[in-house]
Amino acid sequence: MTEQRQHIRRGAGVVAGILCVCLAGSGCAERGAAVEDAHGERAVEIVRRAADTLSAARSAKARTSMEMATGGTRVTIRGEGVYDFRGQLGRLRVLLPQDPAGATAHRPIMELLAPGALFMKNRGAGVPADKWVRVDTRTLSDGNLVTGGATDPFVAAEVLRGVRRATYVGQTDVAGTAVRHYRGTADLGIAAQEATKGNADALAAAAKGFATDQVPFDVFLDEDGRIRKVRHRFSFVNGQQGDAVAVASTTLLYDFGVRTDVRLPDGDDIYAGKIAEE
């Protein structure tokens, strides 16, 4: 396996994994609130509501981008799919980068996201092509904010429940939609305390496992307060080399209310064998 693939798998030992470019965001909160948005307390309140606003929106299509930089190596993983915010279920098609030697692109990894769990198909490493691998995200030191190669869109929003300070940057647009841009820092420990039951343990694990529990973010909210784009910047320590790894994770949300129909695999479809080391 190439050095880049090794980076991608390192977080959980069973997951394709990671680089985090979280272009946080979607920044519009309330109509006519431009003056109030400039004040810190008002901005914090608006950003903290973003996860609840997504639940009210029911569902959306999502695009993800995750970038990891360590030493002179930079790797980017991209994903695309749908997410059901009320059921906290998602489906992503994740594209791994080409090897440095220009080898044929890897097969996309299919991922199903659920509270406390990540399911992956086309995992490789000795896993049959028709089987899924299940990972308990509560046992991951990053809470699956990084390990799966894409941050769960609702978990990305729940990180914002831990906002400690935020600033209204100004108005802009994301993919042709008018948004308000907020920038600040979230505390993963606080986010874990405020998160929904399904994500609380994963965020608590991330608060302990990352190099710091402070997460800088940029988020862009539309006029209904829905996240259109969110970017988080994580930092974790490479367990094998002891180097700090900078990860940026970006999530774009659009087509709210779209039908999702995400179904988790049956027990017989989940691989129970040993995952080969690559």
Image: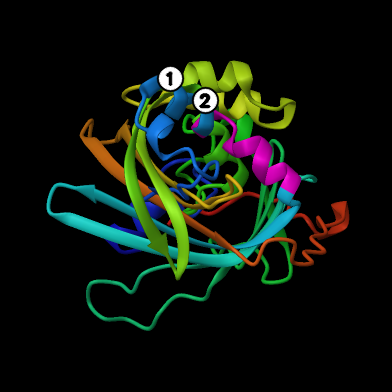
Q: Position of residue 115 (x, y in %)?
A: 72, 38
Residue 54 magenta: yes
Residue identified by numbered label 1: 41
Q: Nearer the viewer, residue 130 or 78?
A: 78
The residue carrying pointer 2 sits among few (fewer than 14), some (14 to 19) or many (20 or more) residues within 10 Å by Cα, namely some
Magenta stretch prevailing secondary structure:
helix
Residue identified by numbered label 2: 45
For the C terminus, the quadrant is bottom left
Q: How is the image coloured?
A: rainbow
The residue carrying pointer 1 sits among few (fewer than 14), some (14 to 19) or many (20 or more) residues within 10 Å by Cα, namely some
Q: Is residue 217 visible?
A: no
Q: Residue at x 36, y 25 (%)?
A: 39
The magenta stretch is 47-56
Callout count: 2
| 186 w.r.t. 17: above or below | above
For the N terminus, the quadrant is bottom left
Mark 1 element type: helix
Amino acid of disc 1? Glu
Q: Residue at x 36, y 69 (%)?
A: 97
Q: Describe residue 173's horizontal placement relative to residue 51 as left or right.
A: left
Q: Assess whether mark 2 and mark 1 are in contact (beta carbons under 8 angstroms).
A: yes
Residue 278 magenta: no
